[in-house]
Each structure stands twice: as C-alpha cells, then as structure tokens.
Image: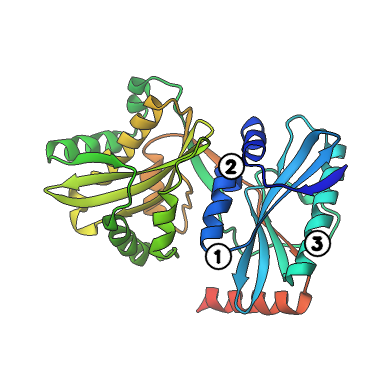
Amino acid sequence: MELKFSNDKNEWNSFLIENSGSFLQSFEWGELQEKSSKKVFRLKVYEGSDILVQAQVIKEGLLFKNYLYIPYGPIFKNNLDLSRQKACLKILIDGIQELASEENSVFLRIEPLVPLDKMIEARICRPFRRIQPQKTLILDLTKTEEELFKNLSSGSRRNISIARRDGVVIEKQKDYSPDFYRLLKGTKERQEFSGHAEEYYKNILKIDGEFVKTELFLARYKDRIINATIVVFFNKKAFTLHSGSDYEYRHVKGSNLLRWNIISEAKKMGMQECDFWGIDEKKWPDLTSFKKGFGGREVEYPAGLDMVFQGFWYNAYRIIKFIRRII
C-alpha cells in the first residue's frame, strides 16, 4: 500500500461517487475552502492501481495555531474488509501525522460517516460536539410526488396551502442574492448558531461543475423575499445546506412552500434523496419539528474524533471551549 497526494479532480470525484462519499469531500468543496485562504490536502492510499481510501484534509485556524480537519471522511472503497480498512487507515493517519508536523498542527479532527474507533490505534479524544451535523433527516425521492406529499404531516400540508393561498411565489436562481444574507443574519441571531462571512455564501453559489452544482431557492411575498435556502446537488442527492427566514412574515408559511418546492424540484432533476442537513431536538426543537414535518428517515453519524499532536495546546483549546460553553 502506498500513500499519495492527489490533484486529479475526475479521479477524486469518481471515487467519491462510486463509494457514496459526501459532497464535503468533493474536489469542488476543497476549492471552496481554498478561496477562504485555507490549505487543502487530498490524500489517497493505493494498492497497485486500486484506491482503497481517500481523505480531503482541511487546515483550519485555531487562535494563533491550527488544526487539520476531515469532514465526513475518510471514504473507503466499497466492500473492503475490516483488516484492509484498518491497514490502509493506518497508512493514511501516518501520512497525516507527518503533514501535521510540517504544518505545526495541534490536532486532527475526524468526523466520519462510519465508526473508526476500533480501527485507530493512536490515542483519541472526544470533542465537545461535531462541526457537521451528527443527526439528519434523509427523504427518499424515488417515491411519486403524490406519495411524498401524502407523507407530509398534516400541519406541513396545511401550511403549504396557506402559503399558496396568500400568494407566496417560489423562485430558483443560480446567482447570489443579498436577500439571502439579510435573512440568514436574522435567523442566526434568533437561533444562536455561527455562520460564515457573506463572501463564503457567494462562493458556494459559484460552484457549477460536472459533479457538484448549487442553486438558491427563494420565497417571495408581495415583492419581498421572506425565505431563502442554498441547495447543493451531488451524486443524485440534494442537500438543503443554509437557510434564512424573515420572522416578521412567518404567518404566511413561506418556509413550508419553499421546502416542498425544493423537494419537488430535486425529484424532477433526478435526485434520489434529499438531506435536510441536521436536526437536534434539544438545541433546535422548532427547526427540528419543522423538518420532521416533511418526512424522511433519521440518520445518526458517529461522534467526532480528535487525534492530538500537541498536548499542551490541545488542553488549552479544550479549556477555552469549555469556558465558552458554560458562559
């Protein structure tokens, strides 16, 4: 087995698609991070000409230090037995440890799609929480549109009717709209979650390649945009990634009609699943209840793992994070 760095977009994305990888591991998503001045490293482990595992590693800022991050990865070749998974993962981790030494990184955070605990021999710590959602809802779009609508909760169907009755209109566009960030800022303040600079969302909507596409869905009411969602399309899946809403106009239920139109449009585009991108009954009970109104199966990913390279700085980071959590 041999570890190599990769810069071949077609080979990278083809492996992801063949092995059910996440768009967060796509070549285009790495390019998005690079536009935010982050370093991105794409590593593969080969056996002969076969790729056994690959991981896109992002260098993230940490006060005046940094850490390495693998979101929803690494991705293994399908049907790889446990012993070979463990062997190629060791080679990958060894390579990342060398990379961490070169980059002076404090730790490596892995947020996997599958459990890795029993395959990693190095000492690991548990972060307080995942960066990416640990639980989500995934809706099967292979059903007919009539079946999908019938499976909505009665409240969701009623709210869709209210929005249509009151004249809410859904629009879809490729270009960025300042209305999105206006709505997102209000939502962030109400729901107390962190976000990115406006330029980051502009760059998301510039992604329009062979493998990954993005679109902006908007709900308009009386010439005012009241809801907006960025949707990512990858490997026959739609992801409702970032959303914002105008609280003043919540009574016209634009968010319900917007969500239903995203589902309907994704199905027409040939998508097989729609991922609602995160639920949390304790932290976001209202948002979680809203998403559950559209159906879908609950999926829970393993907890994140931290591999520590610099113990002193890692402990300092943990103390700061803990203090911020209790203040």
**Disc on res. 97:** 3
Alpha carbon separation for disc pair 2 and 3: 23 Å
**Which is more N-terminal, label 2 or label 1?**
2
* Residue at x 86%, y 38% (from the top left corner): 84
Q: Position of residue 198 (x, y in %)?
A: 38, 63
Mark 1 secondary-structure assignment: loop
Circle 1 residue: 37
Viewer can see residue 284: no
Q: Amino acid at mark 3?
A: Gln
Of the pair 234 and 221, the residue shown nearer to us: 234
Residue 182: image quadrant is: bottom left
Q: SS class of the residue under badge 3?
A: helix
Q: Is residue 129 left or right of residue 305?
A: left
Report the Cα–Cα distance between label 1 and label 3: 22 Å
Amino acid tagged 1: Ser
Up-down relation of residue 89 to residue 161 (above or below): below
Q: Earlier in the sequence, mark 1 or mark 3?
A: 1
Front residue of this view, candidates 108 and 300: 108
Residue at (55, 57) in percent of width and height: 33
Q: In the image, is 259 to the left or to the right of 118?
A: left
Q: Is residue 325 left or right of residue 202?
A: right
Q: Give x and y (percent) for residue 151.
A: 37, 28
The reply to whether discs 1 and 3 touch (Cβ–Cβ < 8 Å) is: no
Q: Measuring 46% from the left and 59% from the top, which residue is drawn there?
A: 283
Q: Which residue is mark 2?
A: 22
